[in-house]
Image (cartoon, rainbow, N blue to C red):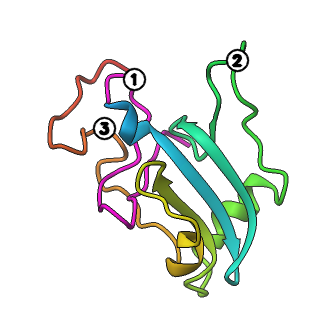
Amino acid sequence: MGMFSDICPKCGKAIVSIEEADRKYRDCIIFVKKNGEILERQEGLYDGYGFSGDYSVEGEPPHVWACLEWGEIVSLNYDEDEDSGMLYFHKECYCIGDEHRYNTSEDDPNQGWQDPDGEEYDDQY
């Protein structure tokens, strides 16, 4: 699976992983939800593959979710329950309790390859 991105429901702009992007669009909080229940939360810089973490530590952040296997998490996005799947927020957009006010995030049609302010990134990856 290639890189992908979702839309922050608060501001309507993409969560991106491209290093050239403004950090405010990369720094995010991700929730995994099942039937409205929060199963897990990650916070940090988005990696483009459904995970976020602290890239300031040596090595890469763990690319795992403890609550479910990755395939199960992806399946939740296609579940008939609108309140099951992944929910992404830009860190600066998020307010405590937002994870209960919004269902799940919409896919970014540009898959994180266009700056949320409208500039397209060079296809260097």
Residue 19: mark in rendering? 1
Question: Tag 1's secondary structure?
Answer: loop
Q: Quadrant of residue 35?
A: bottom right
Decide which of tag 3 and tag 2 comes sooner along the chain: 2
| Prevailing SS of the magenta stretch | loop
The relative height of residue 63 versus residue 57 in the rendered view (above or below) is: below
Give, as a three-letter code, the residue at label 2: Val
Task: Provide residue 18's location: percent of width, then percent of height.
Answer: 39, 29
Q: Which residues are magenta?
A: 1-21
Q: In the image shown, does 110 or 89 lie closer to the viewer?
A: 89
Disc 3 target residue:
113
Q: Which residue is mark 2?
A: 57
Residue sticking out furthest to the front: 96
* Mark positioned earlier in the residue sequence (1 or 3): 1
Query: Can you give x and y, in whole percent of width and height, for residue 77 in the image?
Result: 58, 70
Query: In the rendered image, which quarter is residue 83 located in?
Result: bottom right
Q: Would residue 119 be found to the left or right of residue 63 on screen?
A: left
Q: Residues within 10 Å of mark 3 (few under 14, many from 20)?
A: many
Q: Which residue is rendered at x = 81% and y = 55% of the image? A: 69
**Residue 103 lies within the magenta run:** no
Identify the residue at image location x=63%, y=77%. Answer: 84
**What x and y, as percent, mark residue 111?**
37, 47
- Residue type highlighted by circle 1: Glu
